[in-house]
């Protein structure tokens, strides 16, 4: 992704009654979600903040469509077997086997919400500004990021914040979040546009 990420400190209320187990009640029964988002990114404290906009659709298990529309066009599609990445500016598509691939993407974290506690250590941080906060720390060493923070307002996901292995952070703020709505299956299929370069890293052709 064309992002540089910035750190953010979140204050929490020690008096909050939010528990780690609440994350399952918030997301455990979510089979699909779709939302618009604004993403803010910043390389360091002195760098200019970057903002991009896009849409996210997720179908559990393991399917998602993440699309950036402004200021650049990029698309990430997981069909359950392959992960497709399309960069419109470069006119390039990369395809990789999805199995075992932990992409640095919010869609990957949310594509199987019922199993979050299997892959991550979940901790409740409490409530701040009417938002319940949780932090997820990967149990494995191959995730590509150090932690993820999820913020919920009235049990709806509103903020996704990821800290990568370089200590940088990206933050997505969701709007028009919908749970368990019907999503067209074509959203999770990708056909490379005519004339673009395709880099196939799957090594197999099942």
Image: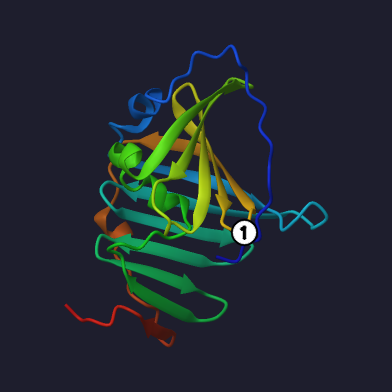
Colour mapping: rainbow
Of 196 and 120, nearer the camera is: 120
At 25% from the left and 55% from the top, the residue drawn is: 185
Q: Is mark 1 on a helix, strand or loop?
A: loop
* Location of residue 40 in the rendering, given as x and y in whole percent from the top left corner: 65, 50
Residue 126, compared with residue 88, is above or below; it is: above
Q: Is residue 153 left or right of residue 190?
A: right
Location of the N terminus (image quadrant): bottom right
Q: In this view, does 199 lie to the left or right of 49?
A: left
* Location of residue 181 in the rendering, given as x and y in whole percent from the top left corner: 31, 38
At 40% from the left and 83% from the top, the residue drawn is: 199
Location of the C terminus (image quadrant): bottom left
Q: Can residue 36 be seen in this view?
A: yes
Residue 131, compared with residue 68, is above or below; it is: above
Of 103 and 55, nearer the camera is: 103
At 79% from the left and 57% from the top, the residue drawn is: 48
Q: Can residue 181 be seen in this view?
A: no
Image quadrant of residue 30?
top left
Residue reaching furthest left? 206
* Location of residue 118 in the rendering, given as x and y in whole percent from the top left corner: 31, 41
Residue reaching furthest right? 46
* Location of residue 176 in the rendering, given as x and y in whole percent from the top left corner: 48, 37
Residue 128, compared with residue 160, is above or below; it is: above
Residue at the disc numbered 1? 166
At 38% from the left and 45% from the top, the residue drawn is: 110
Residue 200, compared with residue 144, is above or below; it is: below
Label tally = 1
10 Å crowding of disc 1: few (<14), some (14-19), many (20+): few
Image quadrant of residue 142?
bottom left
Q: In this view, does 57 lie to the left or right of 8?
A: left
């Amino acid at each position: 992704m064309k992002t540089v990420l910035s750190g953010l400190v979140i204050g929490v209320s020690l008096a909050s009654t939010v528990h780690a187990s609440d994350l399952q009640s918030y997301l455990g029964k979510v089979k699909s979600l779709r939302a618009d988002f604004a993403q803010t990114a910043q390389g360091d404290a002195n760098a200019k903040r970057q903002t991009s906009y896009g849409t996210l659709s997720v179908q559990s298990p393991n399917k998602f469509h993440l699309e950036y529309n402004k200021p650049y066009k990029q698309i990430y599609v997981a069909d359950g077997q392959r992960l497709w990445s399309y960069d419109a500016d470069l006119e390039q598509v990369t395809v990789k086997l999805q199995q075992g691939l932990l992409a640095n993407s919010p869609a990957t974290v949310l594509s199987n919400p019922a199993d979050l506690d299997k892959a991550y250590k979940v901790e409740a941080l409490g409530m701040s500004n009417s938002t319940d906060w949780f932090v997820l720390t990967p149990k494995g060493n191959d995730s590509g990021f150090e932690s993820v923070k999820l913020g919920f307002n009235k049990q709806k996901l509103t903020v996704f914040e990821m800290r990568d292995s370089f200590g940088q952070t990206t933050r997505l703020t969701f709007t028009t979040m919908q749970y368990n709505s019907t999503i067209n299956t074509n959203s999770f299929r990708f056909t490379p546009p005519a004339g673009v370069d395709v880099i196939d890293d799957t090594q197999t052709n099942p």
